[in-house]
Structure formats: structure tokens, C-alpha cells
Amino acid sequence: MSNRHFRERKLQIPIDEGGPGSAEVASHPPSSTGGISFHVYKRHESALQNGHTERSNTDSSGRFTFSAEPTMEDIRRMQAEFTDERDWNKFHQPRNLLLAMVGEVGEVSELFQWKGEVAEGLPDWSEAEREQLAHELSDVLIYLLELAEKCRVDLPRAVLRKMALNKLKYPASKVHGSAKKYTEYKD
Ligand SMILES: [Mg+2]
């Protein structure tokens, strides 16, 4: 794979391509968004222009929450469209996607490197650092979802099964406040 390919792969989704107001985003009619509503694209375009990192999304108890959209399936479809349009499926086999994802995890790690412990909410980080983190976490997620797709793992359902297993392994009544691994507990 060429260096050029790797450099271009940094740009994961259409909204990253030309920056705010790029021709690609602006030219996406609803019919070519693969079922993703046009307002999702437009909202993201506006988020880019504002440099908005959604730090203030909270529920009624003040806990941070994600936005409801896009869903995992929306992101899978957006990335599939992005990859198809560039004829990059020939590079996106499971092993390559796994390595790409691990590379992106490394990019997330770089942002935390040498900072020492970091408080929840990243109160000491600049907006630029927070936005960079948002980009790198997104790269990890995009590759994770594409890897799951190419391995035929229905991730939204798989995560439900795994969380059910985690609850069985770690009953709250038994492990409350403890960091022990499940193999360390005695019945
Ligand atoms: Mg990256």
C-alpha cells in the first residue's frame, strides 16, 4: 500500500474531506446518503464550522450523554459509501482494518502521552486538543465498525450479548467497588 494511500486514509468520512462547506458535503442529495437523513450531514457540517465538541450534552441528572444520531449502522453505511467511492475495498480486508484501528488507538494514546493522570471531562485541555481527540476517537470507531462489518459481526446486537455476559461475570452485589478480575472472586 502506498504512502499516499495511508495519507489519504487519514480522511475518513466525507465531512473531513474539504473542511466546512466542502463540495462533497454540499452536493450530497438525500438520495445519495445511503439512508442517512440530509439533516445529519448538515448538522455535522455546521458542527465543523463551529468547532463544536458537544461537551455540554447531559441528561436530567447532569451526566454526559451522546447524541442519538448517527447510529452504528449510519456510520457503517457512511464509511461503506466513502470506501466504495474511492475503490478502497481492495485494501480494507479484516487484517488491514485491524492494523489501521490499532494505529488510530496509538494516535489517541499520543494525545494522552506524558500528561500524567487526566481528570474526567478533560478540564485542562484546550479546545484544539479536545477536537483532535474527537477526531482520533472517531477514526478508531470508524475502523472498528468497518472491521465488524467485514467480519460479519452485527455489532449493536453483539454488544448486547456481551454486556449480558459481563453482568453474569460481575454481579453488582458481589463486585461493588472492587477492581478484581472475575477469576479472583470466590463463590
Ligand atoms: Mg487518526
Image: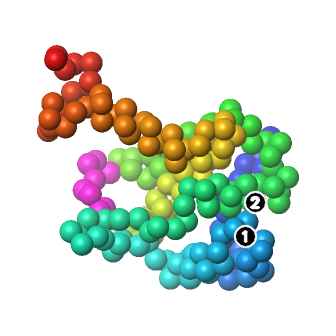
Q: Dividing the picture into quarters, in which one does residue 72 lie?
A: bottom right
121 within the magenta span: yes
Q: Are marks 1 and 2 in contact (CB under 8 Å)?
A: yes
Quadrant of the image containing the C terminus = top left
Residue 29 image offset from top left, x and y in percent: 76, 79
* Boundaries of the magenta span: 115-124
Categorize mark 2 by other alpha carbons within 10 Å: few (<14), some (14-19), many (20+): some
In the image, is 94 to the left or to the right of 169? right
Name the image quarter holding the N terminus. top right
The residue that appears at 85% across and 52% down in the rendered structure is 87
| Residue 2 position by quadrant | top right
Q: Is residue 77 above or below residue 117?
A: below
Identify residue type, mark 2: Glu
Residue ID for mark 1: 33
Q: Residue at 83% across / 60% down in the picture?
A: 85
Residue at left offset 35%, top offset 65%: 65
For residue 81, the mark is: 2
| Left or right relative to 73: residue 96 | right
Report helix, strand or loop for mark 2.
helix
Task: Quote the CA–CA distance across marks 1 and 2.
Answer: 8 Å
Of 120 and 141, which appears nearest the observer? 141
Q: Is residue 55 magenta?
A: no
Can residue 15 be seen here? The reply is: yes
Of residue 99 and residue 116, the one placed in the foreground of this image is 99
| Residue 150 shown left or right of residue 136 in the figure | right
Amino acid type at mark 1: Thr
Question: Which is more N-terminal, label 2 or label 1?
Answer: 1
Regarding mark 1 in the picture, which secondary structure is present there? loop
**Above or below, comparing residue 59 to residue 100 in the picture:** below
